[in-house]
Amino acid sequence: MVDKREVLVQTAMRLFAQGGYTGIGIDRIIAEAGIAKMTLYKYFPSKQDLILEVLTQRDVFFRTSLMNYVDQQEGLAQQILALFTWHDQWFKRKDFNGCMFINAAAEFHERKNPIHQISALHKKLIIDYIESLLKETHGARSAKLASQINILLDGAIDAAHLSGNPDAAMQAWEVAQYLVERPA
């Protein structure tokens, strides 16, 4: 049996990634999902509710994939490199359209907007994960370093998306490597 809710979410996720949140209308989502408008509103009373569910699922998928990839590596240097290698592989995929969270925050820029807030939470959770990797070897410096690494990752995402630079992740890694290896 087809889970109509999940079909809606997956269709919306693909379309939002391709065309933005405000650029893609409900009618297009239901047409491509092959689902009635009443069914959409049964599960999602508003477009904002649908966007929030899309971002929630994207966050879980993104972080799980990234963390599983990184956690397979031995040693801090290899784990930090894996953060950038994972992004490098993502940037080179045909369906790469930038970061859904950066894009959402740009379209819904008011910090009190729930869509902006879920996007900010995603970035915070990424930073928290990076900090957990660094904590043992970098101690008090780990929070700042995790933030710096995330800035490099976000910059690489933007460079890959906006400039079409598929090597942005590995270029950012060169800077991150210096930051991680430098003495406290």
Image: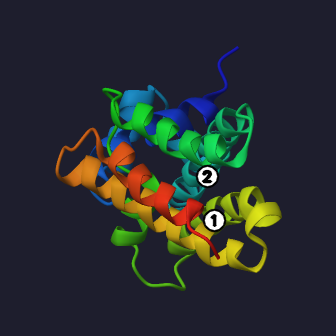
Helix, strand or loop under label 1: helix
Q: Nearer the viewer, residue 108 or 96?
A: 96
**Whole-percent x and y of residue 145?**
60, 71
Q: Amino acid at mark 1?
A: Ile
Q: Residues within 10 Å of mark 1 (few under 14, many from 20)?
A: many
Q: Nearer the viewer, residue 14 or 174?
A: 174
Q: Is residue 140 left or right of residue 56?
A: right
**Whole-percent x and y of residue 51?**
51, 56
Quarter where residue 114 is shown: bottom right
Q: Nearer the viewer, residue 130 or 97?
A: 130
Q: Amino acid at mark 2?
A: Glu
Residue that lies at the very extreme toward the front in this rendered image: 183
Please tell me which residue is depicted at 33% across the width and 49% down the height of the picture.
171
Q: Which residue is mark 1?
A: 127
| Label 2 to label 1: alpha-carbon separation | 22 Å
Please tell me which residue is depicted at 35% across the width and 61% down the height of the picture.
155
**Image marks 2 and 1: residues in contact by CB distance under 8 Å:** no
Image quarter (top left, top right, bottom left or bottom right) of the N terminus: top right
Q: Which residue is mark 2?
A: 53
Please tell me which residue is depicted at 60% across the width and 48% down the height of the picture.
80
Q: How many marks?
A: 2
**Whole-percent x and y of residue 4?**
61, 29
